[in-house]
Amino acid sequence: MELTLLGTGGPDGLPLPGCPCAACETAVGDDARAATSLLVDGVLLLDLTPGLAFAAARSGHSLAGVRQVLLSHPHDGPAVEIPAGLPAPGRVAPGQEIALPTGHRARAVPVDAPGSGYEVTGPGGERLLYLPPECAPAGLPEAVEPYRAVLLDAVGRPDALARLRAAGAVGSTTDVVAVHLDHRVHPGPELRRRLAALGARAVPDGTTLTVGDIHDVPDVPRRTLVLGGARSGKSVEAERRLSAFPDVVYVATGGIRGGDPEWAERVALHRERRPQSWRTVETCDLLPLLAEADGPALLIDCLSLWLTHAMDELGAWDDCAWAGGAERELRRRVGELTAAWRATRRTVVAVSNEVGSGVVPATASGRRFRDELGRLNVALADESEHVVLVVAGQALPLRG
């Protein structure tokens, strides 16, 4: 089954008309995108958008053989002109299926927002799934066969990927292609980086894919260390990297801190941002979690608070305690954590503060904490596939 992406952008395309934002200003060449529309084997058209005939001709295809036009999402604004010779566009009721004389079948898949997704089966049995913008599948069975290709709004709804993976609809050989792309993410390297973390990719308008071909998408690394200063966006970056995972354990090392309303507000904001399917564990006992062989992905936020807890337990802030054995015991604990990080078989993302570039602390205990955190970051970074430094919300890859 051959699939041509006549457009891969959001409903208003990219750049958005009249938008002066930085993402739109840099959306040129292959990064400029028309509204998403898909042509399947030249006979089935999914979504009707402006300039279709020109887009098809530019990709080396004709619309003359189209036998069915299906719409996936509500179209606001003026009606789109139907190119001469095309059949009138229609929709399929959720759960219903239509069959084309060519042997193609299209079944409407319910979604959790206005619109319809479509499962398309080719004459040879290959299956693809296409979802409208800002939509995730609704009511998936507990176990389904993986699709050969899935096209969806991966940027806006990474949780849709998580649902599909949980149901078995997206597997290791599924080609996940991001469509409905707009100015939410800067085009080019930043878009590719974000999609790679989700196990997805983007292609330019006019690309023709063979459904079932295997494509290289970077593997999600097992160990990722995300560094950054205060309010740099490091936690958001860490959460984004696991947003398409069906099951995540969020390891909060900071605890509740009863009586501290400012801390409670921070915790509440983090919880509101995380998917509801994630489970939260409040602990600094990281070794058993890292040792579990088959557990879900871990997000540890953060190592700075783990170190604070360890130094509290050892009384390591005090010079006498430090000289009397606390230093040696802290180094032993850091060594155990590093060994567990190295040996873990779980996917894990850990957040830590980068404190070595700021003002030198005025106290000996403050300088001690800064130095020990720097040593901890160095040890775990050395054992990580990916290391990222977040500055002003921008993720700068240091490794991977």
Image (cartoon, rainbow, N blue to C red):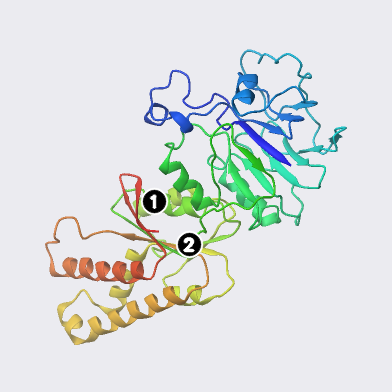
Considering the numbered disc 1 on the image, is that residue within a helix, a strand or a loop? helix
Instruction: Decide if residue 380 is in sight here.
Output: yes
- Give how far across and how far down residue 174 sits, in percent: 65, 52
- What is the number of the mark on residue 221? 2
Q: Nearer the viewer, residue 272 or 76?
A: 76
Pointer 2 or 1: first along the chain:
2
Res. 132 in view: no
| Above or below 117: residue 371 | below
Report the mark closest to the observer, 2 or 1: 2
Query: Residue 209, how many percent across, how many down?
Result: 64, 41
Mark 2, Cα crowd under 10 Å, few <14 / some 14-19 / many 20+, is some
Tell me the quarter of the image containing the N terminus: top right
**Residue 294 occupies quadrant:** bottom right
Left or right of 245 on screen, residue 232: left
Residue at 40% across / 79% down in the picture?
Answer: 339
**Of the residues shown, which amino acid type is indicated by label 1?**
Arg
Residue 207 in the image, given as x and y percentages of width and height:
59, 36
Where residue 68 appears, x then y in whole percent? 79, 27
| Residue 394 appears left or right of 212 | left
**Amino acid residing under circle 2:** Pro
Please report contact status of discs 2 and 1: CB closer than 8 Å, yes or no: no
Q: Residue at x 13, y 60 (%)?
A: 360
Q: Crowding at label 1, few (<14), some or many (≥20) Cα neighbours within 10 Å?
A: few
Q: Is residue 141 left or right of residue 339?
A: right
**Observer-nearest of 73 and 236:** 73
Say what secondary structure mark 2 lies in.
Answer: loop
Please determine whether, in this image, residue 351 is positioned above or below residue 273: below
Question: Residue beneath label 1, please?
Answer: 266
**363 is higher (above) or lower (below) than 46:** below
Disc 2 from disc 1: Cα separation: 28 Å
